[in-house]
Image: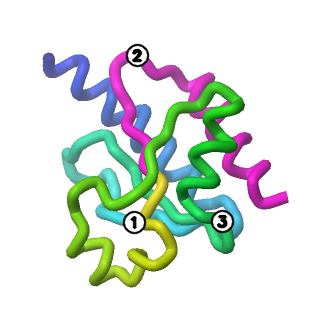
Amino acid sequence: MTAIAEYEHGVAKRYFEEVKKLPGVTVWGPNFDVHRVPTVSITIDDIDPADAARQLGKAGLCLWDGNFYAAKAIEVLGLKESGGVLRTGISLYNTDEEIDRLLEGIAGLRK
């Protein structure tokens, strides 16, 4: 279980570090300098999270959108009216190649 957690953390940290470099992307939540769940939430300027999830889904990338039962947090962050966040959950099955595809897909939404 420790090896699985370390793997997931590493893949998620890479995604976290790379996605925040993309123009128009805001990453929400703590960085990966501490041990945390391998879930990353983002918003993309001028793109509704639900629309982004649908478009990425068409490319075979599975992400979720909304408030994830953290309605108050989304409200306090000022994200309620814009549809919440786009969330990626990393698991032991995810690969660096999939992260590359995801980053390319998110970058492609901005074009």
* Kind of element beneath mark 1: strand
Q: Are marks 1 and 3 in contact (CB under 8 Å)?
A: no
In the picture, which quadrant includes the N terminus? top left
Q: Quadrant of the C terminus?
A: bottom right
Place of residue 42 in the rendered image (x, y in percent of width and height, measured from the top left): 48, 60
Which-is-in-front pick, marks 3 and 2?
A: 3
Could you tell whether 80 is left or right of 6 in the image? Answer: right
Q: Position of residue 23 (x, y in %)?
A: 70, 66
Looking at the image, is mark 3 or mark 2 earlier in the sequence?
Answer: 3
**In the rendered structure, does residue 38 fall within the stretch colored magenta?**
no
Spatial CA span between label 1 and label 3? 16 Å
Q: Secondary structure at mark 3?
A: loop
Q: Residues within 10 Å of mark 2 (few under 14, many from 20)?
A: few
| Residue identified by numbered label 2 | 93
Q: Is residue 49 left or right of residue 74?
A: right
Disc 3 + disc 2, Cβ < 8 Å: no
Pointer 3 residue: 47
The question of residue 102 being in magenta is answered with: yes
Magenta residues span 87-111
For label 1, the residue is 28
In the image, residue 57 above or below residue 51: above
